[in-house]
Amino acid sequence: MPRTVRSAALVQHAPHNAMDDPAEIARFHDRCSDLMRELLDGLAAAPDRPRPFPDIEDAIGWPQRRIASVLGGVFHLRYTEFAGLRPYRFRAADQSASGRWEMWMDAGQARAVRRAQREQRPRSGARRSP
């Protein structure tokens, strides 16, 4: 059974960079790439559960090392539009039980992402249903 822990009790890498404003999280969800949105949705599905990147990739159905690529791709957006903030949290390898970098969303971040999913307007080329 997966272990759930409270975010406040976790040792985080750069906790000051984690977003907590639901409106900003929704705006990030709207502005990011489809792949980044898929990652956010995958993290929101298991809030307060730090996981190593390969476990997250497996859960999403991605090939190994895709998360690193997606995070590299969102770097410019994070720094130009969100002052470097991110709607997820990290724990460094030396602080994690797995010995690898771990990533997760807290419950508040996950709620904001799930709400953004529901309110997401169709992307270009997508048609609204009647």
Image (tube, rainbow, N blue to C red):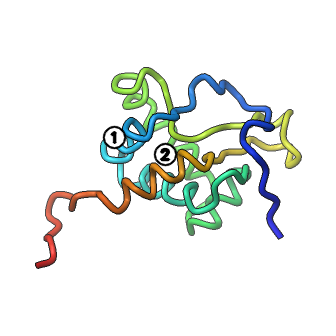
Name the residue: 21% across, 62% down: 122
Residue 25 against residue 115 in the figure, above or below: above
Name the residue: 79% across, 44% down: 100
Instruction: Tell me which numbered mark, 2 or 1, is placed earlier along the sequence.
Output: 1
Q: Quadrant of the C terminus?
A: bottom left
Q: Position of residue 23 (x, y in %)?
A: 37, 39
Q: Position of residue 86 (x, y in %)?
A: 51, 34
Look at mark 2 in the image and give the residue it sits on: 70
- Which disc, if any, is residue 27? 1
- For label 1, count other residues whose C-alpha is less than 10 Å away and answer few (under 14), some (14-19) or many (20+): some
Q: Nearer the viewer, residue 59 or 128?
A: 128
Would you say 35 lies left or right of 122 here? Answer: right
Would you say 115 lies left or right of 43 here? Answer: left
Residue 4 against residue 20 in the figure, above or below: below
Mark 2–mark 1 Cα distance, whole angstroms, equals 18 Å
- For label 2, count other residues whose C-alpha is less than 10 Å away and answer few (under 14), some (14-19) or many (20+): some
Q: Nearer the viewer, residue 68 or 121?
A: 121
Name the residue: 39% across, 35% down: 24
Using the rendered view, name the quadrant where residue 89 is placed: top right
Would you say 59 lies left or right of 99 here? Answer: left
- Which disc, if any, is residue 68? none
Name the residue: 80% across, 65% down: 2
Residue 20 against residue 68 in the figure, above or below: above
Q: Quadrant of the N terminus?
A: bottom right
Q: Nearer the viewer, mark 2 or mark 1?
A: 1
Q: Position of residue 109 (x, y in %)?
A: 53, 45
Residue type beneath disc 1:
Arg
